[in-house]
Image: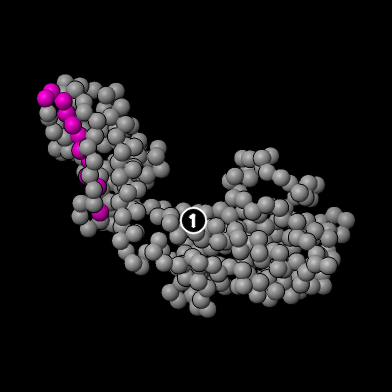
Amino acid sequence: MRARWPLGLLIPIAVCLARCGDFPRPFQGNPGVLGARLVVPPLPLLAVPTPPNALLADAASHRFASDFAKALADRTVPAVAEASRPGDWQLAITADLHNNQVIPRYMVIDPLKRLQGSVQGTPVPAKAWANGDPTALARVADSDAGAVATLLTDIDARIKHSNPASLMNRPAKVYFAGVVKAPGDGNVLLADDVRMDLPNRTIILQNSKAGADFSVLGEVKVTPAEAGQLRVELQWVVSDAHGRERGRVVQLNQVPASTIEPSWADVAPTIADQAASGLQELIEKARVAP
């Protein structure tokens, strides 16, 4: 009978840490952990320069840019209140006066200085705006940052969908670099089974790293535990085409030595199946992440 690899449920690590009690734990007393964690690389910076045409005095204009950059950062947009540099996106802010109200407008400009979208902000009483009232400006920045963040998401989706080469419009090409540091026949058997289980409708395996969107490497660490047990840890690391780590799937358990000695043959298929599920989840997230 095939040995069982007690790794429990396939769930993201962040969810497990917060809510493990919500899930069944069929291996209580010897629980395993399997997680798929996406590491998002730094996004292109969004510069928020001091607006020269926002109907504000210099000090108030500078303060508003700072408030707006902070409000965007609070919404996970990597924004900074400074002039744009080569490669940066830019948020240009202007304002117009209409019937005793000032209406700000926000324009998103790409690194090639092309307007990618704009959105109108919250009307503000002209007197409060002209006085540069700090409370009023901070309130406007916090309110309008949500609309700008939504605009940025829409722009990102539009660009990706319009590009035939985008990963949103084709399967990901993945180079599987194999498995290292497993004792015995683990490197070979685990790698063979992952190669069978990993491809799906959004993942195509290729035999070369050249041209791959992502690379996957499995690393095994086995250490002695108490009473003839072994602590087995598997790390499946996903890197992008630039060599940056995008995330990893982690499998961890304590098992009898006989589970992998003298051969991994009985457990490799189960380990690979669970690892492939985690990798598919992680790569799918990475395909649509910025």
Identify the residue at horizontal 65%, vertical 75% (top origin).
Answer: 192
Percent of width and height locating residue 277: 60, 60
Circle 1 — which element?
helix
Q: Identify the residue at the far front of this view.
A: 201
Between 277 and 191, the residue placed more toward the observer is: 277
Predominant SS of the magenta segment:
strand
User: What residue is shown at x 35% (from left), y 48% (from top)?
Assistant: 153
Asked whether residue 56 appears in the rendered view, the answer is no
* Colour convention: one colour
Q: Is residue 224 left or right of residue 251?
A: right
Residue drawn at x 34%, y 37% is: 146
Q: Position of residue 170 (x, y in %)?
A: 41, 67
Q: Nearer the viewer, residue 104 or 50?
A: 104
Left or right position of 158 against 231: left
Q: Residue at x 31, y 57 (%)?
A: 159
Badge 1 amino acid: Lys
Quarter of the rendering occupied by the C terminus: bottom left
Q: Is residue 37 above or below residue 1?
A: above
The magenta span reads 99-110
Tell me where residue 251 appears, x and y as whole percent: 67, 57
| Left or right of 134 in this view: 58 | left
Does the segment drawn in magenta span residue 104?
Answer: yes
Where is residue 188, by image quadrant?
A: bottom right
Most extreme residue toward the right is: 227
Residue 184 position by quadrant:
bottom right
From the viewer's perspective, is 44 left or right of 182?
A: left
Mark 1 highlights which residue?
A: 285
Question: Is residue 206 on the magenta stretch?
Answer: no
All told, the count of numbered labels is 1
The answer to whether residue 223 is above or below residue 138 is: below
Instruction: Please say whether residue 65 is visible from this viewpoint.
Output: yes
Work out which residue is located at the far bottom of the displayed protein and give it: 207
